[in-house]
Image (spheres, rainbow, N blue to C red):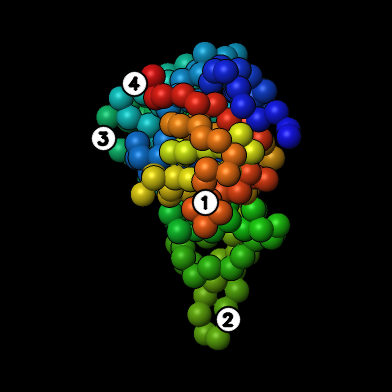
Amino acid sequence: MLHKTYESADEAVSVVKSGATILVSGFGDIGLPFGLLHALARTAARDLTIVSNNAGTGELGLSRLFKNGQVARLIASFPSQPDSHHYFAAHQAGQVEVELVPQGTLAERIRAAGAGLAGFFTPTGYGTELARGKECRIVNGRGYVYEEALAGDFAFIKADVADAYGNLRYRLASRNFNPIMAMAARTTIAQVKRMVPVGAIDPDDVHTPGVYVDRIVEAGDE
């Protein structure tokens, strides 16, 4: 069996280097791997591209990366949450380039990367600023915009239960972007609440098969 389990979040994220693109799961704070993000904030990694639905709030999670000046580019659907002051400060200072992507389009771009597709055409954003510079077509009288697949060097995801093979199960709505991000990254790092013996997760209950998971750490959110 490949070695996938690590003793600490710091050890699990130690492979992340400056310039990496990281897919970060979560919808707001739900399903967000706080432990991995806080460990990343303790590293020297800089010039990161973060792909996430949100941009963090308060002093936790993604906010620490913006506060530290570790993020050079953000690809997100809804960065402007209340109390996202570290993101706002970094953006207003010209430290962070931001690409806004409609939520459904963001999810499909990530899923397309995991499926090995180059991209897809979608009507979302056609005729708006979001379509500027992109290929557009008219199909059966309707306008479409070409969106490229969005892969990551790393995916930071969070699961409720895992086994040593990397099979994962999420809890309720915390599943959100986790499964597709695990498929779309070259290296997937999973923060899990609880480890169980191999075989303890019924095959029908596996949400992400272990083949997509490279590193696992049993860790809380600090």
Q: CA distance from mark 3 to mark 4?
A: 12 Å
Query: Circle 2 sits in a helix, a strand or a loop, which is it?
Result: strand
Closer to viewer: mark 3 or mark 2: 3
In terms of sequence position, does the residue under pointer 1 or pointer 4 come before the other?
4
Query: Circle 3 sits in a helix, a strand or a loop, which is it?
Result: loop
- Circle 4 is placed at which residue position? 59
Marks 3 and 4 close (CB-CB < 8 Å)? no
Closer to viewer: mark 1 or mark 4: 1
Q: CA distance from mark 1 to mark 3?
A: 40 Å
Q: Is residue 175 left or right of residue 189?
A: left
- Circle 2 is placed at which residue position? 139
Whole-percent x, y for residue 91 in the image = 43, 30
Closer to viewer: mark 1 or mark 3: 1
Q: Amino acid at mark 4?
A: Glu
In terms of sequence position, does the residue under pointer 3 or pointer 4 come before the other?
4
Query: Circle 1 sits in a helix, a strand or a loop, which is it?
Result: loop
Q: Amino acid at mark 2?
A: Val
Image quarter of the N terminus? top right
Q: Examine the rendering and report whether any part of residue 44 can be seen.
A: yes
Q: Residue furthest right?
A: 1
Q: Is residue 16 left or right of residue 79?
A: right
Marks 4 and 2 close (CB-CB < 8 Å)? no
Q: CA distance from mark 4 to mark 2?
A: 46 Å
- Circle 3 is placed at which residue position? 82
- Circle 1 is placed at which residue position? 202
